[in-house]
Amino acid sequence: MMNISRSLALISLFILPLLSFSFSVDNPTDRRVLVLLDDLSLKSSHSIFFNNLKSRGFDLDFKLAEDSKLALQRYGQYLYDGLIIFAPSTERLGGSLDSKSIADFVDSGRDLILSADTSASDLIRGIATECGVDFDEDSSAMVIDHSSFSVSDVDGDHTLVAADDLVKSDVILGKTKIEAPVLFRGVAHSLNPNNNLVLKVLSASPSAYSANPSSKLSSPPQLTGSAISLVSVMQARNNARVVISGSLQLFSDRLFRSGVQKAGSPNKYEKSGNQQFVTELSKWVFHERGHLKAGSLVHHRVGETDEPAIYRIKDDLEFSVEIFEWSGKSWEPYVADDVQVQFYMMSPYVLKTLSTDKKGLFHTSFKVPDVYGVFQFKVEYEKLGYTTLSLSKQIPVRPYRHNEYERFIPTAYPYYGACFTTMAGFFVFSFVYLYHK
Amino acid sequence: MMARGHVRFLVLILAVAICGAASAVQPISDSHRSAAVDVFVPVDGSDKSLEEAYEALKTLEILGIDKKSDLSSATCENVVKVLGSSSSTLKDAFYALKVNGILKCKSGGDVPKEVVSQLQAGVKDAKSLLDFYYSVGGLVLVKEQFSGTDPSLGDAKAIFRSIKSLSQNDGRWRYSSNKPGSSTFAAGLAFETLAGVISLAPSEIDQSLIQTLKTGIVKLFDSIQKYDDGTYYFDEKVVDGHESQGPISTTASVIRGITSFAASESTGLDLPGDKIVGLGKFLLGVGVPGDAKDFFNQIDALACLEDNRFSVPLILSLPSTVISLTKKEPLKVKVSTVFGSKTPALTVKLSHALTSGSKDSSVITNQELKFDADTATYFLDSFPKNFDIGKYTFVFEILLDDSANEKAYITEAETKVPIAVTGVISIENPEIAVLDSDIGSVESQKKLDLTKDGAVSLSANHLQKLRLSFQLTTPIGRGFKPHQAFLKLKHESQVEHIFLVKTSAKKSELVLDFLGLVDKLYYLSGKYEIQLTIGDASMENSLLRNIGHIELDLPERPEKAPRAPLQSADPLSRYGPKAEISHIFRVPEKLPAKQLSLVFLGLIVLPFVGFLIGLTWLGVNIKSFPSSAGPAISALLFHGGIGAVLLLYVLFWLKLDLFTTLKALSLLGVFLLFVGHRALSHLASASNKLKSA
């Protein structure tokens, strides 16, 4: 008996920190990350990236991609909040994992970093396709750029691309501008035009193309110019975030430490922009930044404080919502000037931009339209890099009651006057008629 | 298992191919030193095991970084504690002694007797290779560090034999006699242990034993793995029971083993030289590892290679494998040991320079490189006249000047280095023309100026052709075929078409016959931007030029023809605020001004006033009002009732609703009926009386 209770206490001691670290609404940053490698030497060659993640509090679990004990979930519970797949050549994942279970992992709102490389396997291509990214079908193709390559003493075929066409978003790439170009050597991909959730973070220059550098071209390359994406991100509708890179080396210590000089540019940088780029991107993908939380929608009539059950047409109402942004450690008030509310019935009747008090409260006031029916307050906030907010609250609107119309209309005074003088005349006449002699 | 080995092999190839795309293994340099400081950053001994502390200290010591002072105190405390206690494990004692060798926490005559006796007992009771390794290694360290002690090993020959019994036929070793799996990593440990046994043995070990060990080493070298570029490494094939060792630690273990074995005995070890250089190249090819263990293994193994008894490998490295013909840079080659230190006098010869693709034609043969003593570089400053841009494989040979050194130093038989030669390509006679299809006569021809954008505007219909031509020549006047020669036509609707410019040695030309292309162009008439891209890895002046536009007049799209593909809308367009919408309220009906209503109210009141005036003018009276009390009261009540009903109407207008009004009215009505009947019947009887009177 003693033994059992002791072991129970031990188990709960063991489970409690696990529970408190797991992904939750109050703490959106991922904690437990599974890293799938196709060679454990990547742990050493990409150590700056991994150590940086560890120093930010992530619990990395390194596994070989073909490890037969791999599992993402146990007893229906996911064991990890994030997944890093650095296994470009793996044809089959070990254990119970396949591209479908990875898609399910993302569908459950968890995050993924996927890196392919030249000669990426069909498995990796398949996962990327699920996320709206198509890698160049030619498995020997690489991104070549004869105009914006990195000037290097040892690279003779211009496949080490110095890319600086970054998406302009502070939330994805951090507030500090990435000055030095990002070094990239790998495979090109394009975005599926039917998928509007995926976007390019790092694009190639117009002179880039995707081909095998060591063989002559016999037909025009599939991907050319700025249509080539080097690194893309996808934020699913459930706010799961995915980063897809065409280069595994982008994350490597070698390129982190390497100096860079773009061809034709006099600027020489001591260090490439890779470390900053990758660090900021990983902050974004693991929800250390750009994660919004909204309180409930609050509305009431002007001058009142309680929320009514119904509005009458032409009521003046005040609307407010609190929005907070996750800073990695705590919820900070969110400041923006483009949050909008819709008063919606089949289509928006009123769409107003909310003003903020810089403490996270967004508010506005407007008059209820003179149309009755069941309306909704809708806040649908989509901003590049931020999680999507989609809130709504239903409220009916009724017309005037019979006694709420205007009673004394000046225009009708002649009619009233006519009635009342007639009544007065009748009263006087009743005397005259009855008692005149 | 096979698959995993295969994958690891692939990735390593990749890793080597990256850095060694130019086979340019560079000796250990400052980048290693700065990285070492990062990798071993919290080297404070307190929170690390002694093994880790030793690895950090050893690496920093080899690299010549002085960081001892920041970590000696805490680590030393730990060392003294371990050495002082008699209950520490063999492994701890071993690493404590290793750290002590660097930090000198305890030295001189202050021999830690407990540890010595513990190690001696450890040798005696040793069951597994690791027990032997730690205890023998510990005793060797005690002998080195504490002067005047000579810890006896006991029966050295018996120990030697019992360790030897763990060896396998293929040169690998087992960890212990009851485990069947053999390991290359263990072989390295065994060699190191046996070297320790030899150095501790009071008398010579039997030569025949050493001889069998040597053949074991040679056998082990048969299992070495190889890459195409002459890089060799050892890998662990069987990983059971023990944690898997990567190729770096396995290679490092073997190198440590054979160097300490070679150092401990005098007859010399005859190892294949190219494999020793290959091992050095492998360890250098790893680059800068990020993992502390790998970093230590790399540096420690290289340090063993740098200072060994059999042969020191010399590494040929090129600071730059890209030669620009325009800058007239010489080809520089450096030869050094793995740590970049100086070498004895030697000659570097460029034996061939092969054009990639064609195996036979050598552009340069047997050229000796000049030596610049100041920078310790060998260089080739003049290339033959027919040396053109492109990709080459240079084959170097290193010859030692002094044949006495040939035993001590070892070089690769030949080092193949891919070299890229770049230069400025001249683009001549660029022309663009619109031709009439059937006769091929030139409709309009324009010289192109490829130095500026947007110079050309052309127009054509579907019966015509577009011809673009230019000539590319290399600096020595040969025709040049670039890897990238694209013409891009971009329609206003963002639909793009890419055409390859056919390049031959003489002329590059592209003819677009629009008649055959209408389908491909999706019958889209209108303005097309023309963009020309010419680029190659050897071309220093790669260009991307918007040469202008062409106005195409194409026929209407037939029903069956495919439509232009959907162009992806700018994904950023869905972000950002939408336009505000404010509801437009129904306009209230137009009403006349209030004054007008008041004027009409006045007009409406006028008839009543006229009525009153008319009554007075007619001289009305109420003389027939009943004079007796009863009828008078009922008449007053009757009129009061009428007044009350009228007042009720006013109240109805002012504030009452219909229901209260009707209730009050029904009460008043009954009352009125009653008093009205009384009052009117009195009046009727009065008038009847009058009539009858």
Image: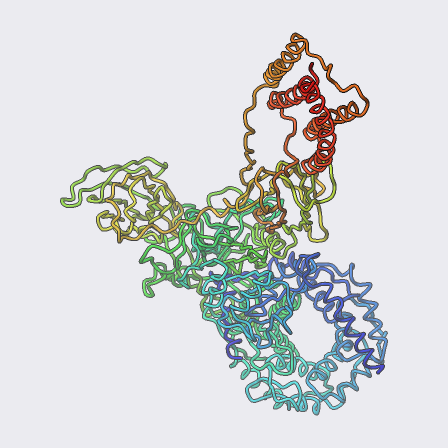
**Which residue occupies 49% across, 74% down?**
B226
Residue A359, above or below B111: above
Q: Is residue A344 left or right of B70 when viewed as pictured?
A: left
Residue B314 drawn above or below residue B173: above
Q: Residue at x 59, y 38 (%)?
A: A369
In terms of image quadrants, where is residue B161? Answer: bottom right
The residue that appears at 52% across and 78% down in the rendered structure is B224
Based on the displayed image, in which of its 4 quarters is residue B50 positioned? bottom right
Q: Position of residue B422 (x, y in %)?
A: 40, 51
User: Foreground residue, B221 or A75?
Assistant: A75
Who's the residue at 75% across and 82% down the image? B135
x then y, percent, for residue B417: 44, 62
Q: Quadrant of the N terminus of chain B?
A: bottom right
Q: In this view, which residue lies farthest toward the left? A: B439
Closer to the camera in the image, A354 or B171:
A354
**Position of A98 relative to A252 (above/below):** below
Q: Nearer the viewer, residue B378 or A6?
A: A6
Residue B192 in the image: above or below residue A273: below
Number of labels in the image equals: 0
Measured as percent of width and height from the top left, residue B593 is found at 59, 19
Whole-percent x, y for residue B118 in the image = 81, 83
Image quarter in which the C terminus of chain B is found: top right
The residue lying toward the viewer, choosing from B20 and B394, is: B20
Q: Is residue B72 left or right of residue B457?
A: right
In the visual, does B636 lie left or right of B485?
right
- Which residue, as the protein is rendered here, is positioned at the far front? B693
The image quadrant that residue B100 belongs to is bottom right
Q: Residue furthest top?
A: B617
How is the structure coloured here? rainbow
Q: Can residue B85 be seen in this snapshot?
A: yes
